[in-house]
Amino acid sequence: MHLRFINYSLLLIWIISSTTSWATNTQALSPLPNEVKEKWNNFSLVGQTKLRRYGFHVYDSSFWTIGDRSDDFNSANFLRTNSYALSITYARNISVQQLLSSTKKEWQRLGFAGLYPLDAWLTMLENIWPSVEKGDQLVAVVTTEGKTTFFSKSSSLGTIDDVNFGPAFLSIWLDENSRFKKNRRELLGE
């Protein structure tokens, strides 16, 4: 009888600790800043991931959307009918020049050179983005009106008013040809 009580107690402790661990793991790795939550209070988390390069933790990211999550990201319907956000919390220091260089390389790799005004977009980003330090956050919110606004944890950083920019920017992470397939699948909740 005493042994049975101990076994039940251990089982109960294991269940409670497993449930607590699960609840902790369902929180966003890179949550939306308060200013974003205040402006758009109905974003729901689609997926999240940790990017590691050569064993180093680079950032945590979370993908959020308002609207029907069943549409494929690459479909024109998704881009017309949904507002969405990508939140990135950096795990290391990265200069604005490194951010811009990586963005340009990924756009070129995706075949966007010649299709979009990449240099003009990069100039706009240079005026919006800061260099980031470990723990800093950048969030891109793309609305159905075609505007993309960038936020830090504490404030709005700037807006790019070009209907093509937001989808092209998020394609770096969400396009079927994005560099990091596993991270893409995790962001899309697959």
Image (cartoon, rainbow, N blue to C red):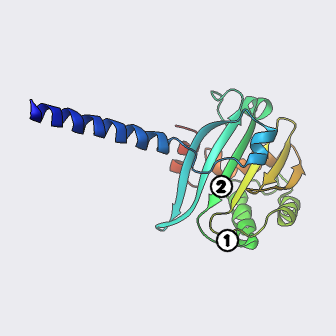
Q: Tag 1's secondary structure?
A: loop
User: Is residue 1 left or right of 52 when viewed as pictured?
Assistant: left
Q: Position of residue 55 (x, y in %)?
A: 46, 67
Q: Do the residues labelled 1 and 2 touch (CB within 8 Å)?
A: no
Name the residue rendered at 73%, 68% in the picture.
Answer: 101
Q: Where is residue 113 in the image (x, y as percent from the top left)?
A: 78, 57
Residue 126 in sight from this viewpoint: yes
Q: Where is residue 151 in the image (x, y as percent from the top left)?
A: 78, 54
Q: Earlier in the sequence, mark 1 or mark 2?
A: 2
Furthest-front residue in view? Answer: 2
Quarter of the image where one finds residue 38 = top right
Residue 178 in sight from this viewpoint: no
Circle on res. 88? 2
Residue density around tag 1, few if under 14, some if 14–19, many if 20 or more, within 10 Å: some
Per the image, the residue denoted by label 1 is 94
Q: Tag 2's secondary structure?
A: strand
Question: Of the residues shown, which amino acid type is indicated by label 1?
Answer: Ile
